[in-house]
Image (cartoon, grey):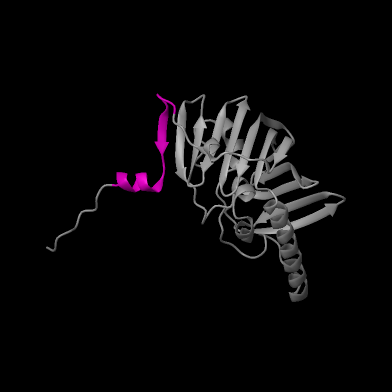
Amino acid sequence: MNLYAMKKTHVLPLALLVACFSLSGSLLAAGEKPADASSAKVTALKEREAADELTRVLKDIQTLQAQFQQTTMDNGGRRLQESSGDMVLKRPNLFRWNVADPFPQEVVSNGQQVSYYDKEMEQITLQDLDLASSATPALLLSGDTAAMLESFAVNMAKTSGNHFFTLLPKGGDSPFQELQLTFVDGRLSNMVLLDSLGSRTKILFDKVVMNEPVKDKLFEQYVPPGIDVLDQRASVMNAQKPASQSVGKP
């Protein structure tokens, strides 16, 4: 279960943006088998070209600010949730996603740790930002793109001024089946996430501002007085473990 998806289902859509992907797995997405060695080479070449192009597009984005509208639908097309808010990203590995409606939430990375704040529940969760084992939409947009794309098979389609990318996780234990990114004239237009249950989350970005100065102070994490803190950082968890007892020889 996603560590951010605690007690309330309305937490999940925003949590998907920072859910961990496995970096292990086969070269091709599960279920895909090339017909022969020649087609395998062609597939690998196309994926590499697509990954290189996505890396180029994302490297041009040093900061990103936008408003978003997010809709989640089940595999039958029934609307499950809607939310809206704003976000800001800054390389390397800094991001803040704020949901204003209907349930106030906030996810912030200061480059070393991530805080999830559920204002309705009056609870904040702290976790380490594990760059070595996380390949997430939020980090994909703000982190080391080339390194993270090693955990995806990437496909690309282009029209005049538009780029459409489809990312398939190589690991079989990912909570995502597919991630789609659309760029219009170099600007992020929308993101679509398909999970293993067939649910589809679409995020539309509006009023996009790129490469304007953003202060690091915006990504500082603040714990309001009286808020419950669930600290899941490794240093804290290890400190809470009981000391091991040596067993003497009989």
Residue 215 percent across, percent down from the top left: 57, 39
Nearer to me, 60 or 156: 60
Q: Which region of the structure is painted magenta?
A: 224-241
The residue that appears at 62% across and 42% down in the rendered structure is 89
Nearer to me, 100 or 173: 100
The residue that appears at 61% across and 26% down in the rendered structure is 100
Residue 152 percent across, percent down from the top left: 65, 58
The residue that appears at 63% across and 40% down in the rendered structure is 213
Quarter where residue 77 is shown: top right
Q: Quadrant of the C terminus?
A: bottom left
Quarter where residue 240 is shown: top left
Q: Is residue 35 magenta?
A: no
**Residue found at the very far left of the displayed protein:** 250
Residue 164 percent across, percent down from the top left: 78, 50
The image shows residue 171, relative to residue 45, as above or below, that is above
Along the horizontal axis of the image, is 224 left or right of 50? left
The image shows residue 247, relative to residue 123, as above or below, that is below
